[in-house]
Image (spheres, rainbow, N blue to C red):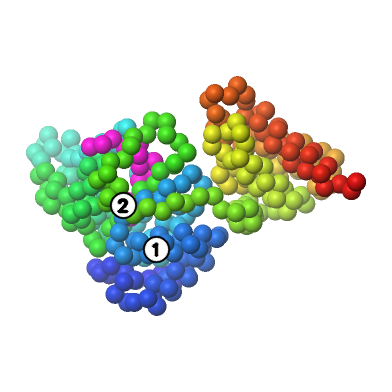
């Protein structure tokens, strides 16, 4: 049962026992990530804003969704990019109504920041370091004062559960800006990296399941080759576990089309490669200085998995 949210900050005034019980309920919805969940929950329960730094597909959104559902508050998503102006973040007056009525609080259309402040929700800004500097300055005011002044509307004061949650990908610096000291000073920070192989296999099994006779084996293979994309010398950023999930789903359909019902089938390895091309080729980002293709990289990873590793394990 979800925790009850009042006008006070949840989980703090009721002591450690309620915080621990809340953590247990949230953890039941997440595969692994016990440490990251505990640290994130501690930060937001303490009333702090936080930056989650890590590549895509590392359960950041899953953790925040579970916490906000437990608290019974909204989670509002914003994509950080050059188009995220202060007006888009805060809100604007309806132009048609302004022409008829002039400016007033009634014709103000709240943006995600104001919505989150009024509802006491989490404002989750992905790709935080892609947002323009003046937009970040607007956020600084909201984080520092827990309120903002909106012209012709008045001062918007945040409910106690309002938090700013930022995320950024440390492996992608294209089109990003360096965050100022003032921004860093307002945010706690937690690095969230990829999980270990057993945890990722559990995630894939949960999301993709075993749709046919090769299901269990293909989950292991999918996770192995997906993780290998993160270590390949020609790859700047590899695929997240989402690639492994899609690989299993595509492989399951290919197995039905080709009549392959066992991983012992001679055509099973090639089936996995074909699923890799579909599921992973668009998810890996190559080093710009290397003249190769995603398909070549994936073929090399496939050969390591299905030719070199089995040969190394063979007797003699």
Residue at x 32%, y 77% (from the top left corner): 14
Mark with earlier residue (2, 1)? 1
- Snapshot quadrant of residue 18: bottom left
Compared to residue 259, the image places residue 38 above or below, namely below
Disc count in the image?
2
Q: Is residue 307 above or below residue 264?
A: above
For the point 46% across and 59% down, the residue is: 36
* Between 274 and 193, the one nearer to me in the picture: 193
Q: Which residue is mark 2?
A: 187
- Residue 38 in the image: state x and y as whole percent: 44, 64
Q: Quadrant of the N terminus?
A: bottom left
Front: mark 2 or 1: 2
Q: Is residue 204 or residue 179 the one in the foreground?
A: 179
Q: Give the x, y percent position of residue 106.
A: 15, 48
Q: Residue at x 43, y 73 (%)?
A: 20
Looking at the rendering, the stretch of residues picked out in magenta corresponds to 122-134
- Marks 2,1: beta carbons within 8 A: no
């Amino acid at each position: 049962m979800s925790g009850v949210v009042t006008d006070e900050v949840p989980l703090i005034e009721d002591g450690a026992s309620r915080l621990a019980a809340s953590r247990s309920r949230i953890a039941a919805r997440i595969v692994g990530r016990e440490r990251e969940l505990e640290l994130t929950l501690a930060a937001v329960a303490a009333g702090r804003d936080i930056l989650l730094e890590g590549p895509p597909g590392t359960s950041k959104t899953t953790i925040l969704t579970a916490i906000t559902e437990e608290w019974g508050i909204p989670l509002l998503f914003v994509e950080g990019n050059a188009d995220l102006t202060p007006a888009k973040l805060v809100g604007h007056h309806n132009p048609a109504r302004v022409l008829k009525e002039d400016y007033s609080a009634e014709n103000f259309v709240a943006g995600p920041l104001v919505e989150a402040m009024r509802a006491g929700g989490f404002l989750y800004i992905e790709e935080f370091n892609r947002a323009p500097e003046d937009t970040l300055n607007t956020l600084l005011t909201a984080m520092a004062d827990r309120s903002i002044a909106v012209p012709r509307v008045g001062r918007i004061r945040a409910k106690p559960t309002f938090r700013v949650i930022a995320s950024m990908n440390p492996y992608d610096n294209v089109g990003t800006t360096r965050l100022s000291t003032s921004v860093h000073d307002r945010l706690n920070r937690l690095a969230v990296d990829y999980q270990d192989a057993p945890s990722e296999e559990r995630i894939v099994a949960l999301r993709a399941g075993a749709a046919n006779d090769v299901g269990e084996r293909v989950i292991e293979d999918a996770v192995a080759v997906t993780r290998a994309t993160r270590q390949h010398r020609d790859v700047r950023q590899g695929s997240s576990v989402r690639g492994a999930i899609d690989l299993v789903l595509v492989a399951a359909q290919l197995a039905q089309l080709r009549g392959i019902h066992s991983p012992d089938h001679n055509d099973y390895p090639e089936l996995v490669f074909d699923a890799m091309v579909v599921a992973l080729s668009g998810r890996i980002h190559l080093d710009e200085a290397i003249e190769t293709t995603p398909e070549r990289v994936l073929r090399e990873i496939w050969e390591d998995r299905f030719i070199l590793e089995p040969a190394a394990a063979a007797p003699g």
